[in-house]
Image (cartoon, helix red, strand yellow):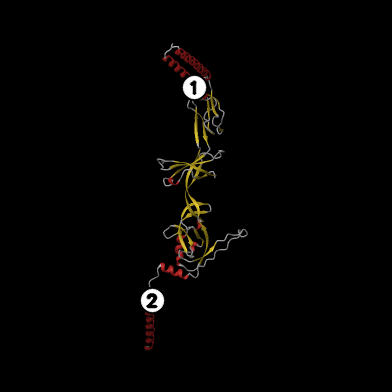
Amino acid sequence: MKKTYLAALTVALLFVLWMLSGVLGNGEARSPAPTLAETRDAMLRQRDDASTAVRVRTLTAETQRATVTVRGRTQANRRVAVRAETSGLIVALPVEKGDTVRAGDILCRIEPGSRPARLDEGRAAVNLAELEYQGTRRLEDKGLVSGTGVASARARLASARADLSQRELDLAHTAIRAPFDGVVEERPVELGDYLASGGVCAEVLDPDPLLLVGQLSERDVARIVLGAQGQGRLLTGETVQGVVTYLAQSAHPSTRTFRVEVAVNNEDARLREGITTELILPVEEYRAHHIPSSILALDDVGELGVRIVNDDELVEFVRIRIIRDSPEGLWVTGLPETVTLITVGQELVVPGERVRPVPEIEPSPAAATASAPPLLIETGTDPRRGSEAGAGAP
């Protein structure tokens, strides 16, 4: 029994010593956990000899203009309600709605009535007044009429001439004419209607040039200059070019916006008034790069940017500002004049990492239909990628 107890005691003692040796050993070898920066530096040192391959594109800045886009509408250059200056029955309507007219064309004709006869009467009165005046002058030369008599005769002649002019105008006003070249938009009267003085015969609008009208915010109004080339995208799908011809000096009292007008050539009256339009107005010039929108990323503070490769083949994150978009990508500022942009693999690398740039190759016509082979990325365990790739994805 003593041997059994002794063996058991020996085994228990050895087990306790073994356990104590592990605890004490770990306590002596324990050290603080490495920081994120230390881990990052360590991983970068480990991967210096095994650089990640990324596909890159070399871009050079181009001169581009930033633009301001506002919503607006098309509007005729002029619109006039042509009114009668005399009254009477309408006896002729030479034009219809939608007709094109020239300045001076008759829109409505009013019945002359007794106006021709009254015109003849006025002419006779002028002739009589002229004879009386001439006779009075001859009597004055003989000393038979005073200066007052001559002045009275001159006044009667002037009154007769004024009355004649009024009767001539009244007869001329029976033909209501177009004030300018344009299109008859409305004609609210019909043959036989009585048109009073001041009544509307027709409404004529001038479609050339057509105006693109919008409202600029207080922030953008100082950036627009008269004479600049503007563009309009009509809701009908048409795109037109024009010149900024008007910029309001005072803001609208309720919206605090400023009216802007762009004049567009419309000789054939193809463009119509009242169509919703997107006005694109140029502002400052920039040196900008055209990049695909798929490569955008965010840095640690949420600023928009892209990843590039510097001359030492190290990754850099550069913040950018978008000045204009296009169907093929974005125009941005903030990059160097000539830059090597990472287009594939940017989500797998971090700033400061050494990479192996692989230039993009334009596909030949024969290979255009074949899919390009995938870019081989040398992978490895890197705790940095989980955080930055997720935060930097656009």
Q: Which of these two is toward me, 375 or 310?
A: 310
Classify mark 2: residues with Cα within 10 Å, few (<14), some (14-19) or many (20+). Answer: few
Badge 2 marks a residue whose secondary structure is: helix
Q: Position of residue 202 (x, y in %)?
A: 52, 30
Mark 1–mark 2 CB contact (< 8 Å): no
Q: Earlier in the sequence, mark 1 or mark 2?
A: 2
Q: Position of residue 300 (x, y in %)?
A: 42, 60
Quadrant in which the N terminus appears:
bottom left
Q: Determine which residue is flagged by label 2.
A: 29
Which amino acid type corresponds to the residue marked 2 in the rendered image? Ala
From the viewer's perspective, is the residue at label 1 or at label 2 nearer?
1
In three-dimensional space, the C-alpha distance between marks 1 and 2, rounded to whole angstroms, equals 120 Å
Q: Quadrant of residue 238?
A: top right
Front residue of this view, candidates 7 and 394 = 394
Q: Percent from the top left, x then y, of residue 166?
A: 48, 22
Q: Residue furthest front?
A: 142
The numbered disc on residue 165 is 1
Residue type of the residue flagged with mark 1: Ser
Which residue is farthest top? 144
